[in-house]
Amino acid sequence: MSNDPLLQPYQLKHLTLRNRIMITSHEPAYPEDGMPKDRYRAYHVERARAGVALTMTAGSASVARDSPPVFNNILAWKDEVVGWMKKLTDECHDEGCAVMIQLTHLGRRTRWDKADWLPVVSPSHEREASHKAFPKKMEDWDIARIIEDYADAAERMKAAGLDGVEIQAYGHLMDQFWSPLTNDLDGPYGGSLDNRLRFTFDVLKEIRKRCGDEFIVGVRYTGDEDLPGGLTKADGLEISRRLKDSGLIDFLNVVKGHIDTDAGLTDVIPIQGMRNAPHLDFAGEIRAATNFPTFHAAKIPDVATARHAIASGKLDMVGMTRAHMADPHLVRKVIEGREEDIRPCVGANYCLDRIYQGGMALCLHNPATGRELEQPQTIKPAETRKRITIVGAGPAGMEAARVAAERGHDVTVFEAADQPGGQIRLTAQQERRREMISIIAWRFEQCEKRGVKFHFSTFADAEAVLETNPDEVIIATGGLPHTEVLGSGNDLVCSAWDILSGDVKPGSNVLIFDDAGDHSGLQAADLISQTGAKVEIVTPDRSFAPEVMAMNLVPYMRNLQKRDTTFTVTWRLMSVARDGNQLRATLGSDYGDFRRERLVDQVVVNHGTRPLDDIYFELKPKSSNLGEVDYDALATGGAQSIRKNPEGSFRLFRIGDAVAARNTHAAIYDALRLAKDL
């Protein structure tokens, strides 16, 4: 038996968990009609099959009709959820994995104009900054019915065969009762800490009454709101003791902070550039103070940190949730002694940021996550070995090379630069985003293990490609910045890439015109403002940097707001002209014939990229498919079969930004779904 601390079993009441690694409750927004159907089940079963001990489904599964999800969550208040949860649970149990679910009433953390348009409820009228709904202050009958709603939902989960439930108490209704900031009820549910905790214990008592003492029940809660006037660390320790001493729960799952703002949420669930495991020591203090089963997750992205959390006795179970989105086979690779093969989580937070914009959670560099029904998490060997030539070693080209090599093909990659990476390497030059380079480094290591032949510092032309006698050619050359967007003065501007690469030095009074809304514009602003320069970011959009999304925006704002930075929305850069030793930038508006002018010494334009596609069009007439892609097959997981030119000796495809400016996930997804069947 292994002596690895992570691989030791853990006894939780009557339940034996096969190791110390868990997936904490989270909602990837895969439900259909509020139910965890096939896509949802496939996601959890994939990770169960690979060895995780416990998978927590459904972050924020709703227990009541007046707790409508603001994105796609499981509706635990519907009886039909039982059948779907039973199918998921049975399949995970068959793989040796325990299953629990997180239950909650959102309280004020939702909106009244969702679902049935019922009033939002909370123990006060205080509005949450993130969701902006003014709640109804709860009445006695609200409290009574919601206690029953919690118990009903728990009873449904027991009927579905789950091993237990977890009650959510950070930012939601449960701890809205706890916090003095969100509870101004009179007794018996407001005022003293005893009164503010009464709702929690009434819920737990009712769940025990319905589900019995053997059913596992835990609480995921904040042990310190880290907010002026909110719950303190001392309060959190006292609440922890009271939860344990109640005899009503079986584990504590502790977090630290508050989630009522984007900044607060990002501190609770840190992203790239932020410290790993920032709350682990705090969770360890809770465990030491209570001597009670303690779980925790917050940016524990690597096995070494997780192993330390268990070996040091800080935790009993360690959550590696985003890490399992990046690599669902993480545990299996640990068991097999292949930790170096684990696809690393880079903290890009594409997963969480997407769900808050109404999309389903996707991993930036594992496009099979959430698509287990269509895309493979493990690549099957090909029946026939082919010669595959790839031009470009950015994220798209590197993924195509990795997948083709895993298929067993003879793979050759041409890259004009002296090392792989493409736009990722440019992005990762900034210290805060250096984790991004792991997207390339992991693929390069996987390719080298499988004998991929790389030709760096080689600007391949059609002749060089044809000399490899390829069966398949994939063009992944990416694109170059497009800055010619002005009526006049295009020659007077530089691109965001020019700033990030160091090819152009920052000015002292700079206007950044951001008409792409992605990281490049904000990274350029961050770098320029760091020099002490005055920076104005101008965008024609209603908000700036919409492609960056909420949680990723937080570190940028923390830097930019403490510097001389101005944000100007709904204005468009029209032209730039010389004015002495300065530049006169003219702004216009999409809303009318309005003009404003700025005198600056540098103008930076961020307007996406245009494809580097010359080699593609040179090779196209020589290919058997004439470059055509079967989109139906591409979208549904099928193989490409178009043959239009009998004279062609190879098929030709292009992927990523060589097609059009998109993002890293799109580039890697292009590569996976194409190369997996070549």
Image (cartoon, rainbow, N blue to C red):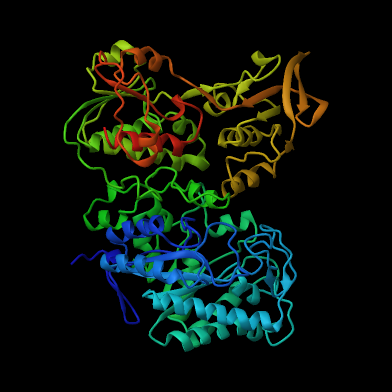
Q: Is residue 38 visible?
A: yes
Identified at 56% across, 82% down, the residue is 148
Please give the count of numbered marks on the rendered protein: 0
Visible in this render: residue 461? no
User: 433 or 518: nearer the eye?
Assistant: 518
Q: Which quadrant does the N terminus fall into?
A: bottom left
Write down the quadrant of residue 539 in the picture.
top right
Q: Is residue 41 left or right of residue 360?
A: left
Q: Is residue 600 left or right of residue 379?
A: right
Q: Is residue 611 left or right of residue 161?
A: right
The correct choice, above or below, for 484 with respect to 283 in the image is above
The percent position of residue 439, horizontal first and vertical second, equals 39, 40
- Height in image: 194 above or below 538? below
At a point 52% along the width and 86% down the height, the residue shown is 206
> Residue 282: x and y, percent?
50, 68
Percent position of residue 359, x then y: 53, 49
Residue at image coords 44%, 32%: 425
Front one among 459 and 283: 459
Q: Please identify the quarter of the rendering in which residue 178 is found.
A: bottom right
The quadrant of the picture occupied by the C terminus is top left
Q: Compared to 639, does 262 lie above or below?
A: below
Q: Nearer the viewer, residue 177 or 71?
A: 71
Residue sitting nearer the eye, 186 or 153: 153
Question: Residue 564: x percent and y percent?
Answer: 73, 38
